[in-house]
Image (cartoon, rainbow, N blue to C red):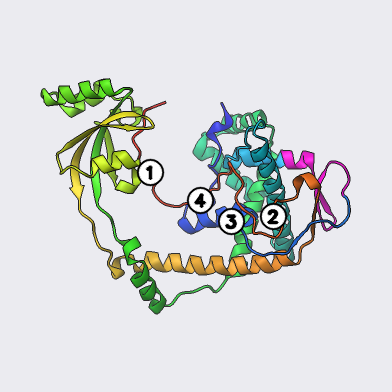
Amino acid sequence: MKLTALPGKVRLPRSRRGRILTMLVLVALLGGAGIGWWSSRAGELPDGVVFAYGDQTETVEQLQDRIQTLKALYGVQPPDTQDTAKSDTFRRDTAKAVAVGMVLDGAARDRGIVIADKAARDVLTRFISQQIGEGPDARSKFVQALGTTGTSEDAVIDEIKRQLAVSQLFDSVTKGSSVSDAEVADAFAQRKAQLDNPERRQIANIVVRTKEDADRVLADLNAGTPFETLVAQRSLDGATRGKGGDLGQVTAAQLEDEYGKAAFAVPAGGRFGPTQTKNGWNVGWVRQVLPPQPAVLDQVKDRLKQQLVLEKALATWREWLGSQLAGANVRYADAYRPADPTAPPQQAPGWSVPGQAPGQAPAQPRPSR
């Protein structure tokens, strides 16, 4: 079993708000707010120390261990070491992220937030059950997989504790955030274009390797061969081959540009292609056209209100976080000092943040791998 099955899969909990609270574990580390809190030079640090914060230090070895855990849980992928510029940015941004994490850990302790081992282990047990299965064999497989990446179950437990603590800290800081009906109505008027449901189309697709293959598919269709038959015989997409090539109901924005233009240029029942995408050459069939639907306040009111409450809570969180960071004093080793110490932290290249973009993923035609 390879650990590649694990990155990005720890989610606490499954609700949209819960995904965003989980996201704060890394967004707070990588995004946050506040300026003027990084000490550029306040005394030299010992060899092998990345940074010092109060009476705490982070060593190079500890930082590497943290990266392995983040890689296992969140899909963090350090850049190729041969790309020295990206590696340098990643190293500095990662050190910065860990330092902010220490600030948050201290804030959680100050508010009396303590996560019990049992709570974290219960979360891990549920995760293993969902991803691997039940019983001791499943846990053994999970632990073995962690070992292949150089991390450990204890390190994962510590990271889950951090997730739960930041979630509780967020609730504590943003308690009382509310939105009035008048604010919801105003937001609806301002965001109506975004809330409208765009035109969707039910599309079936055949993907092949070359334009010549796609031309032969079209010729067979014109000769009367059923689309579903050619999907089963020719399509490279194992995910849709057993469903007649069905991509589901998709919007133009969910498709690669050229494919989307072609798919939305023909009427219901029409065929289009050959069209090249990054996955090959495609011939499509528009099975159904679902016209756009304007948003109605009564239908989206509850969802919009939840979004506004969350936005207000996030604004409160960022303002609070800024005040916390303003008083911190982090001293970096030269090789790990952020490129712009006074700027808000930016997401490091290759980091995958859980829950960062809630919503449906693009339904781009793609062959099986």
Q: Which residues are magenta?
A: 45-64
At x 57%, y 39%, the residue is 75
Amino acid carrying label 2: it is Asp
Q: Rounded to the nearest whole Å, what is the CA distance between mark 1 and mark 4?
A: 15 Å
Task: Say whether residue 51 is left or right of residue 189.
Answer: right
Residue farthest toward the left in the current orientation of the protein = 224
- Count numbered badges in the picture: 4
Depth check, front residue: 75 or 284: 284
The residue tagged with tag 1: helix, strand or loop?
loop
Number of the label disc, if any, that sits on residue 340: 2
1 or 4: tag closer to the N-terminus: 4
Depth check, front residue: 29 or 6: 29
Q: Rounded to the nearest whole Å, what is the CA distance between mark 2 and mark 1?
A: 34 Å
The residue tagged with tag 2: helix, strand or loop?
loop
In reply to whether residue 63 is colored magenta, the answer given is yes
Q: Are marks 2 and 4 in contact (CB under 8 Å)?
A: no
Q: Position of residue 141 (x, y in %)?
A: 59, 29
Amino acid carrying label 4: it is Gly
Q: Rounded to the nearest whole Å, what is the CA distance between mark 3 and mark 2?
A: 22 Å
Q: Is residue 108 visible?
A: yes
Q: What residue is disc 1 on?
A: 362
The residue tagged with tag 4: helix, strand or loop?
loop
3 or 2: tag closer to the N-terminus: 3
Q: Are marks 1 and 4 in contact (CB under 8 Å)?
A: no
Q: Is residue 111 visible?
A: no
Q: Rounded to the nearest whole Å, what is the CA distance between mark 3 and mark 4?
A: 9 Å
Q: What residue is disc 4 on?
A: 355
